[in-house]
Structures are given as C-alpha cells and as structure tokens.
Amino acid sequence: MPDHYYVGRKGDAFEYAKVPADEDEAQDLVLVWYMGTNKDGEPIVRYQDGASSGTLSCFDNCQFVRGATLVGHKLVQTGRIRVTNDPLIHAIMHDARAGKLPSPLK
C-alpha cells in the first residue's frame, strides 16, 4: 500500500489523478484541500474538478461520503456514495483519514 495517493501539490492543494475514460484522453487532475473534521471526527475535503467543485464528508466510519457538487455557484448534485465504489474518492478519503493532507489553516 502506498504512503499516499496524491500525485503532486499545487500551492496548498493536493493533486489526484483521474483515470482517463479512454487511452487517447489526457489524464486530468483533481485539486483537493483538507478542511478539517466534522462533529464525529471524520474528515471533510473540498475539491476542484475542472468547472465543478464541491465538498466530501465521511460518515459511518468513512464507509460512505456525503457530497455536494457545484458548477459555478449552482448546486447540481448532492448525495452519498460508498467510498469503495469510487477509486478516486477512496484515495482522497484514505489520505485524509491517514493525516496525509495537512490543513492549510494550520
């Protein structure tokens, strides 16, 4: 198991690689910022994925995340997902729980 899953840093953001849809597509990066923990001590992150941005917050021992996605300032999606159903979310939340994403607020 790797020490962390992020592939780089850009300022105070951590860069995560998205898996390209096909081999001709360039690899996109998602920027992630650790925002601290919720009242249950579970991590919260903010992300930027192209024109989309949002937050992810763990719950139920980080088996699931609650998320909100915005395009511009318009809320386009909310919901929850099992962390293991999405490799990118799994990698981000694994790093957040393991303390690999120091908060820019520190």
Image: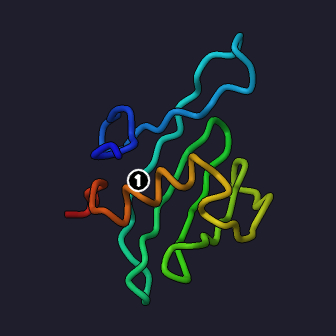
Q: In this view, does 5 lie to the left or right of 87?
A: left
Which residue does the image show at 35% across and 46% down from the upper left? 1
Which residue does the image show at 56% across and 73% down from the upper left? 63
Q: Name the residue under label 1.
A: 33
Rendered position, 62 above or below 51: below
Image coordinates for residue 59, horizontal then vertical, percent: 55, 80
Q: Looking at the image, which residue sits at the far bottom?
A: 39
Q: Is residue 76 left or right of residue 70?
A: right
Rendered position, 20 above or below 90: above
Circle 1 Cα neighbour tier, 10 Å, few/some/many (<14 / 14–19 / ≥20): many
Q: Looking at the image, which residue sits at the far top?
A: 24
Q: Looking at the image, which residue sits at the far right?
A: 76
Image coordinates for residue 4, horizontal then vertical, percent: 33, 46
Q: In this view, does 27 lie to the left or right of 3?
A: right
Which residue does the image show at 53% across and 55% down from the upper left? 90
Image coordinates for residue 58, horizontal then vertical, percent: 52, 73
Mark 1, secondary structure of its residue: strand
Q: In which quarter of the image is residue 85?
A: bottom right
- Number of disc labels: 1
Q: Quadrant of residue 40?
A: bottom left
Rendered position, 73 above or below 97: above
Q: Looking at the image, which residue sits at the far front?
A: 1
Placement of the C terminus among the 4 image quadrants: bottom left
Image coordinates for residue 42, horizontal then vertical, percent: 43, 78
Colouring used for the render: rainbow
Which residue does the image show at 76% across and 61% down from the upper left? 75
| Amino acid tagged 1 | Trp
